[in-house]
Amino acid sequence: MKLAFCASEVFPFAKTGGLADVAGALPLALEKLGQEVVVVMPFYKCVQDGKFDLQRTTGGINYARIGKNIKVYFVANDAYFKRDWLYGTTHGDFPDNLDRFAYFCQQSLEIIKAVNFKPDILHCHDWQTGLIPAYLKTKLAADPFYKNTKSLITIHNLGYQGLFEKGQFWMTGLEPKYFNPESFEFYGKINLLKGGIAFSDVINTVSPTYSREIQSKELGFGLEGLLRKRREDVFGILNGLDYSVWDPAKDDFIAAKYSSGGLSAKAEDKAALQKISNLPVDKNIPLFGIVSRLAEQKGFDLLSSCLEEICKNNLQLVILGTGDLKYHKLLQQVATKFTKNLALFLKFDESLAHKIYAGCDIFLMPSQYEPCGLGQLISLKYGSLPLVFKTGGLADTVNSDNGFVFTEYTPQALLESVDQALKLFSQADKWRLLQKNAMLADFSWEASAKGYIHLYEKAKKS
Ligand code: ADP
């Protein structure tokens, strides 16, 4: 099949979140399974300034290669994309985001045509590409080049929908009639994700459980009605994990390498983490780790309400994260009170993240909702048992055989789960068994890519 990916961020060229990982890794896995793939993304400043081997087509389109022979084409427009940030600054979103991403969508379709890559599927991602399925079904409906092209939109996080004032609808280049409640209109505003969902042939999210949850009032963010209407076309496929980056047997960031066959070196990683965290070095104290955005979605509302209670136990906790200032302050307050068992790193630090995944015994990830989640997949691979709330991708990957799951989003339930983990920690044989189960689970991209090929085939038949 011929597959064209359109995404606003693609690893390694530009990344703010999980979308970039998917858009960077899935094409590689699909190529390995014999699919023909191209990728299109904006020509950001970080791409222009980065150390990438950039080339140019005879028509003047910038591109780079990933995998064996996947071309990543860049939509250039310095006024729109040559900025220090992708979507906005710390002061808020860029005011011209509708203009920027409408341009990106239109130009993506132009580029794919210009390089004569007639795709079976246009695989779109999130609100930034929500106009593409609409263009295919309206402006381009009679275009012979795109006659047989179907669209799939992947929702990476329904919390971000791309909302704009209705007066800007002309910027989309669509006829005004498409500003209606069945497609782009959402409580008087333009909603790009909604339009993308309405016009796509197939829709998916990044875990089976999340694909069901987004059809409910609690987690549908106002789009549950539309998603329920399209439920025959809504699917969920778990993201994969890049085991060439995340593998304790090959990880150069960590003090000692280990695998499921021999876990003894993990104790060295624990000691190393305790040392750099300024915590007492003691293998018998259970060590919890967190690597996360500090945001409500990640469970920090819940955690803040019982962090002191948690810290009163005989345990240690290392937190690495950045995000909402209110959580920075709150965590700092608790950390000054519990210097012997809470270590705080309020920054983004790739190397330290690896050390935490390897060094901790229990990885804490009590997300309120979680489309897929990478943290728990990484910690499973590192034999650091995840402790999670039963939601989205966490519910699909963690269970009582490889970690700890609490089912009510309350401080009591979280505390009980912590207790349960502490009890099991003292039973070495049982703990080992869970660690082995965790480390042997396969969440590779190959499995996900096979799921996507299935979906592409469904879309082709639609
Ligand atoms: P998100 O919703 O933030 O995308 P995921 O669990 O899907 O959550 O992925 C988060 C990724 O970002 C993980 O690989 C995690 O290790 C990494 N990460 C988050 N915060 C930090 C940080 N402060 N330093 C280093 N890595 C981080």
Image: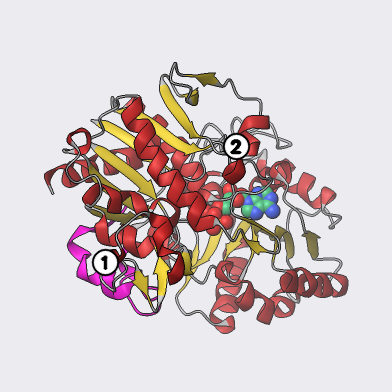
Q: Is residue 58 left or right of residue 136?
A: right
Q: Which amino acid does label 1 sit on?
A: Lys
For the residues marked 1 and 2, what is the alpha-carbon distance in whole angstroms? 55 Å
In the displayed structure, 336 sits above or below 399; it is: below
Q: Residue 248 carries which label?
A: 2
Task: Say whether disc 1 or disc 2 marks the residue closer to the N-terminus.
Answer: 1
> Which residue occupies 70% across, 76% down?
307
The quarter in which the N terminus is drawn is top left
The residue labelled by disc 1 is 177
Which element is circle 2 on? loop
> Which residue occupies 53% across, 80% down?
413
Residue 429 % position (x, y): 54, 53
Q: Is residue 217 magenta?
A: yes
Q: In this view, does 136 lie to the left or right of 421?
A: left
Q: Is residue 309 magenta?
A: no
**What stretch of residues is rendered in magenta?**
211-237
> Which residue occupies 77% across, 48% down?
273
